[in-house]
Image (spheres, grey):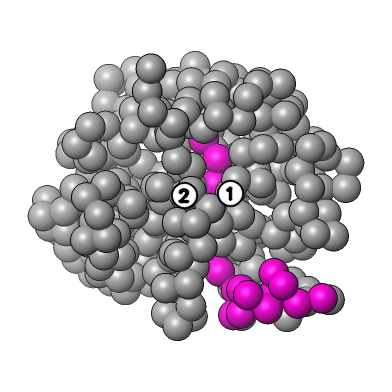
Amino acid sequence: MNSPAGYLDSHLHLQAQHLELTLGSILERAEKAGVERMFCNATREEDWQAVINLADRGKEAGGKQLIVPFLGIHPWFAESAGTGWEERLLARLQECPAGIGEIGLDKCCRADFDRQQRVFEAQLSMASALRRPVAIHCVKAWGLLLEILEHLAAAKQLPAIMIHAYGGSTETLQRLIGLGCFISFSCRLIADHKGHSSFLATPLPLLLLETDSQGRLSVADARDGAGATDSQGRLSVANAREEAGGATAAPTQARSVQPVETENHEISCNEPADVPSLYAWAAAMWGIEEQELRQRIWSNGEIFTDTILPR
Ligand SMILES: [Zn+2]
């Protein structure tokens, strides 16, 4: 019998500049909450080094790879990727066992969609060639995403894929499952009743859970202070949009959800220490023990990152 697994937060952005001052306490709370692994995603070339530094810092802290780096260019920043970015990303990936993320397609952002597609496909080919896991962001571009992924699968070149903060239809979900993609759900799912059927239709061996954490200006204040609201806690619209995938940025409310008990029934999931609330909710939805779900998701994360993490 395996020893009990820690929590995996399968998608977040700890490198966000505004977190610099609070990062130490965010990591401390994550450790206390039992979070033992976090997939930390870059969004543009400017933050690749910060993500690598975080991953190294995690390693120094105690052997286990606490922070797993993902390097890439997010669709929102597709247009600002400087000339030669492909060579520079390739060089980084060759020197560092990182995944590729956060990359994808987003029809709700301003970046030119053709440019997004070119940047996305270039990163996918790198992932195929180097056998790296990929963290994908997709907003209202599911048809094209499926076309690209199914084409790669037919050519036996599909790398390990995780769709982060899944928000597509159950039909799309079935095709992604057919391709063996991991499907990650964020805390927004709790309040998003439409998403519950997708969540329950995702086979446990492909399920991942995430906070997509951007942190808050003052996490402690936001968590402990009476009346501290989301609008006080966030630093910028860009951060709020990132977390909301371009949609609403309201904190998730666990009004009708059992058995998660939190103050004011609010699960904000603004930092990795909040991920156990999502696990508790998810386990209750599945009707399984939380520990069993934790073990399963830990192992899903290991399978997903198999080519970059020694097991
Ligand atoms: Zn993200």
Question: Could you tell me residue 237's position as x and y percent?
Answer: 65, 75
Measured along the vertical axis of the image, is residue 19 above or below residue 280? below
Q: Which residue is mark 2?
A: 35
Corner quadrant of residue 218: bottom right
> Residue 24: in sight, yes or no?
yes
Q: Which residue is mark 1?
A: 275
Q: Amino acid at mark 1?
A: Val
Q: CA distance from mark 2 to mark 1?
A: 8 Å
Q: Amino acid at mark 2?
A: Val
Say if disc 1 is inside 8 Å of ligand 1. Answer: no
Question: Could you tell me residue 248's position as x and y percent?
Answer: 75, 60
Question: Could you tell me residue 201's position as x and y percent?
Answer: 66, 21
Residue at 42% x, 73% y is 24
241 in the magenta segment? no
Q: Earlier in the sequence, mark 2 or mark 1?
A: 2
Nearer-the-camera pick, 299 or 170: 299
> Residue 170: in sight, yes or no?
no
Outermost right residue: 256
Corner quadrant of residue 20: bottom left
Q: Residues within 10 Å of mark 2 (few under 14, many from 20)?
A: many
Question: Disc 2, disc 1: CB below 8 Å?
Answer: yes
